[in-house]
Amino acid sequence: MLPAVMECRTYPTFIRTLCQQYLITPLFDQVHKIWARSVATIIEDTVFIQKLQDTKFDLMLTDPGMTIGVLLATYLELPIVFNVRWINTGEGLFTIAPSPISYVPVPGSELHDQMDFLERIKNMLHYLYNVIEQHLIINPAYSDLLQRHFPPGTDLLSLQRTADIWLFRADFVFEFPRPTIPNVVYIGGFHCKKAQPLPAKLEAFMQSSGDHGVVFMSLGTFISALPRKVTEAIAAAFAELPHKVIWRFVGEKPSSLGNNTLLLEWLPQSDLLGHPKTRAFVAHGGTNGLYEAIYHSVPVVGLPLLFDQFDNLLRLKVRGAARVVEAYSLTKEDFLGALKDVLENPSFHTNMQHLSQLHRDKPMTPMDTAIFWIEYVIRNKGAPHLQSAGFHLPWTQRRPPGGGRLRLLSEGQERELVNMVIANNVIRLQEIQRRVIEDDHLFRGINAISLSTIDRILRKNQFRMKQAYRVPFERNSDRVKNQRVEYVQRIFEIEGRPVPHEIIFVDEAGFNLTKRRKRGRNIIGHRAIVNVPGQRGGNVTMCTAISQRGVLHRHAVLGPYNTMLLLAFLDGLRQHMFQLDYREPAQPEQPHYVVVWDNVSFHRAALVRDWFTNNPRFSNIFLPAYSPFLNPIEELFSAWRWKVYDREPYVRVHLLQAMEEACLDISVDACQGWIRHARGFYPRCLARANIACDVDEILWPDPDQRQDAEVE
């Protein structure tokens, strides 16, 4: 690309920057397609995505110049912190902050903030070129990915603008002043640090320069990019200086190289710039190198080659801290003249010292500032209060970059929109859109609102799509609430008795060969398929009893449970409990056992009642209707069931074996945790509160609250 850029540099000033920008466009087209394919591959790897979700990251710290991070963070619903300078078509501030093009130069334009009429026209052309590049080159690369894996109406820019904090690698000591917004934090020069001692041989070379000092030259990653005639001109100019020269160089040694010049393939750049003998820095204009030059107050001779280097060196030139030469037309005389000007004119060193003083004069270092804001986002789980409301507007309602942005909905209107979802969790976005447009009282003047805007407002308020859980209307009727109060009071009455007691929870659950996960993932338009046995076989029903001592007794039968099988189970439970009593130390009184189960018909059969009459150490209590959350054994079956099916039994014999093995994995601590969690609903039952709660994972929507339910 360098030869093509040098060809552009021969054109008139007005068009050569547009020529350079045109050269980069095909690269954008290729690289964004590659990144889109990479993200699609990651998202469709369900095992990898599950690992990322299980890791529970606090945030995504990423450079938006590579879009993989922001897309993946949005998909995982993580707070985002950008470490940013460049994004999409240019500088990040043009994406996030108001950018009046009358005095804010567009990146790549090689303009400063004091523009005349023709320069403003040029600035406008660069701005329009970037807009076209964004919407016709970059956005289409992600259209398929966003359509398949993200909400309707999502585009790349809308995702990038949701970042909580933009750690912007810039400092207004270096940049031209311009508007900004609250969630942009400037950390320019965050990588700079005090110089360390040089290796002995390099230090000896520095000291050998005497009072003249050393000129240091490095072109960064473009170390070997210069044409041969240019390196010869540079070497010849260096040879005429009384100073010593250290040149980071790879390739064939120039024939005009002088005895005062040391060539090295690698060198400690920051330590050299911080050395008191360093008098000037010959650089290509990379951002990191220029901030190090500012930090160590070393004036610059600029030799820009590609990308933002021309703009960077222009900023130092305007501030009187650099001279800039053109690589395509460089001669020994031009380069030597620039060197002598920087070395002999004290204003360059004075101006750079002033910039260095301003750069360092901060209450916190840029690195400490970056760390603070990263931890701030972690502590507060994001920073949406710092985000501009203008990004939630349709593009037709946004003003041009020079005039700021309007807000579509006020804070009160956004709260009303959120209340619609709180009142009806399954309301559709189209229904919200219709209500907003038709409501002339709360949403006066809102004649149009896009579905993507509604979705962004909900996401900003921490709303996400979830599986809807159906709650019967009868669940919280007065009759059921009264039953819950009576049940809890009965439990408390039993626990208040002086006679020792043990509460045993009993229930039945069915297993068969074809039970597998009911939800899966696949490409849009294709079914999610799981292989199961061709014949499900008959159900295997497991009746189980648990208490604070863990799983007490279990009994599996082919087919459903009935009264006779239940009586056999109760006999086995009685024998097991008496054996436990025999093995444990004698108590003053024999304990009483209270069986808690649901009120299915065969639990109330006459033979079952007779069994409890004939076994006075046993009694039973029926759970209230629509109250599975009061029975901890529901959690047992949930954990047990997945442990069974993780063993993938495909015949009945293997199913029975898997059921026995899975039961051994259920710990006493797990049972105690499930019992404690069920008792956690007692205060709400006594308060006659509405409880719309289902078993399994819905009991703990916050994974951090599931510790009692974990099964080793």
Image (tube, rainbow, N blue to C red):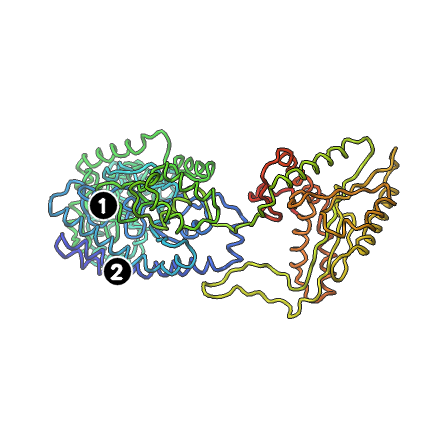
Residue 476's spot in the image, x, y percent? 60, 42
Please tell me whether residue 125 is drawn above or below residue 559 in the rendered image: above
**Foreground residue, 511 or 562?**
562
Where residue 176 is drawn, which disc sits there?
Answer: none
> Element type at marker 2?
loop
- The extreme left residue here reads 117
Which residue occupies 23% across, 57% down?
Answer: 255
Q: Give the SS element for disc 1.
A: loop
Return the x and y of residue 504 as percentages of the image width and height.
76, 43
Q: Does 472 sit left or right of 38 as displayed?
A: right
Name the residue furthest bottom: 534
CB of mark 1 within 8 Å of CB of mark 2?
no
From mark 1 to mark 2, how far is it between C-alphas?
A: 34 Å
**30 above or below 401?**
below
Near mark 1 (Cα within 10 A), the count class, few <14, some 14-19 or many ≥20, is: some
**Which residue matches tag 2?**
1
Q: Looking at the picture, how far across and down is residue 614, in whole percent? A: 88, 45
Coordinates of residue 439 in the picture (x, y in percent): 35, 43
Quadrant for residue 390, please give it.
Answer: top left
**Amino acid found under the numbered disc labelled 2:** Met
According to the picture, the residue beneath numbered tag 1 turns out to be 400
| Number of numbered discs overlaid on the protein picture | 2
Q: Amino acid at mark 1?
A: Pro
> Which of the pair 657/499 is nearer the observer?
499
Q: Quadrant of residue 363?
A: top left
Relative placement, left or right, of 47 versus 658 is left
Quick one: quadrant of the N terminus? Answer: bottom left
Q: Who is closer to the viewer here, 408 or 475?
A: 475
- Looking at the image, residue 386 lies above or below residue 567: above
Answer left or right for 409 relative to 564. Answer: left
Badge 2 crowding class, 10 Å Cα cut-off, few under 14, some 14 to 19, many 20 or more, is few
Of badges 1 and 2, nearer the viewer stands: 1
